[in-house]
Image (cartoon, grey):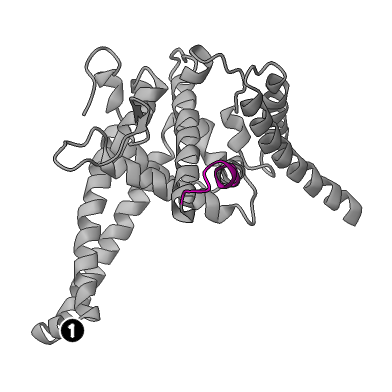
Amino acid sequence: MEMTDGRIDEELLWMPPYDELRKYTRLWRDTYRVYQSLRRYEQSQTLAEMVETRFIDELESMFGDRRDRIERTIEKLAEETLEWKVWANRVVGLGPLSFGKLLGYVGCPAARAYPSTFRKFCGYGVTNGVADRRTKGMRLTYNNLAKSQVFVIVTQFLKAYPRSPNIYGEFFYTWRQRYEQTKPEWTKAHRTLAAMRKVASLFLNHLWVISRQAHGLPVVKPYAHEKLGHTTYIPPEAAWHVKKCRDEVLHAIATSLASIELERDDDVSEFHQHLLERFYERVLGKERRKKAKR
């Protein structure tokens, strides 16, 4: 469901290359469905007896090759976007294929005038204090494909975390630990998904800010800053790969740490202090170990 009260720039939303990404992402999804349905013939003895194996193998190979070509096209188109060139290509754990699919579902992030509108369309919004979710008998208020793709991207951040510590991984583990203390009645799965939702919201905020800046459009303050008086801000540069962009990342983290001194909410201040200092120590610890080896 899209808002039409001036919050969305329709011309910018699906301008090239976002329009091409939308077409190829849909084509990839249809091809992938066919490819997966063919693989079921290999897994089911009953289905395998109905059709010649050679015929199924030929179809599977044909659709598999087609899927691979589409994926390469999506990657190429994603690398042409401003968001990829100025920011996403240096984010730990984020690849052009998953990023391109997301843009194919949501269009240009800068087309939406507010970060809350962008998050809500991606399935990570809040209505009357309750997170948006499926409700029986009610029409979805978000793009379910975009929500699934964001979940895939967050999972990639967490998979990359053990070998490449990143701000999204730190954000996840810090929030999950906090939920263990404040929400003991929740199941482990509930706390994990809630922490992943926090990471998704942070990533989408970063993507929206970068997209607006890249297209020369104004950036409004987050709701927590505008209405609740919070001052702590984690800049998009904090998500960059430390080895590739050390100076920019350290500057972004230092800026975030400085802003904490002005934070009015002691609970929020303490939480972000722990989060950013822990990440900062990891970065400097790696540098110290390298110097010691020399």
Magenta part, dominant SS = helix
Q: Residues within 10 Å of mark 1 (few under 14, many from 20)?
A: few
The residue lying at 71 percent from left, 27 percent from top is 251
Q: How many numbered marks are there?
A: 1
Is residue 248 something one can see in this rendering?
no
Residue 283 rendering spot, x and y as whole percentages:
74, 43
Instruction: Report helix, strand or loop for mark 1.
Output: helix
The residue lying at 9 percent from left, 84 percent from top is 50
Q: Residue furthest front?
A: 185
Is residue 132 something one can see in this rendering?
yes
| 283 lies left or right of 192 | right
The stretch drawn in magenta includes residue 182: yes
Which amino acid type is shown beneath numbered disc 1? Thr
For disc 1, the marked residue is 53
As displayed, is residue 69 above or below residue 169?
A: below
The residue lying at 65 percent from left, 18 percent from top is 263
Residue 205 rendering spot, x and y as whole percentages:
47, 29
Q: Which is nearer the eye, 41 or 122?
A: 122
Q: Quadrant of the N terminus?
A: top left
| 8 lies left or right of 215 | left
The stretch drawn in magenta includes residue 41: no
Residue 129 rendering spot, x and y as whole percentages:
37, 27
The residue stretch that appears in magenta: 177-186
Q: Which is nearer the eye, 72 or 256?
A: 256
The residue lying at 77 percent from left, 42 percent from top is 281
Residue 261 rendering spot, x and y as whole percentages:
72, 19
Q: Quadrant of the C terminus?
A: bottom right
Q: Which is nearer the eye, 191 or 84?
A: 191
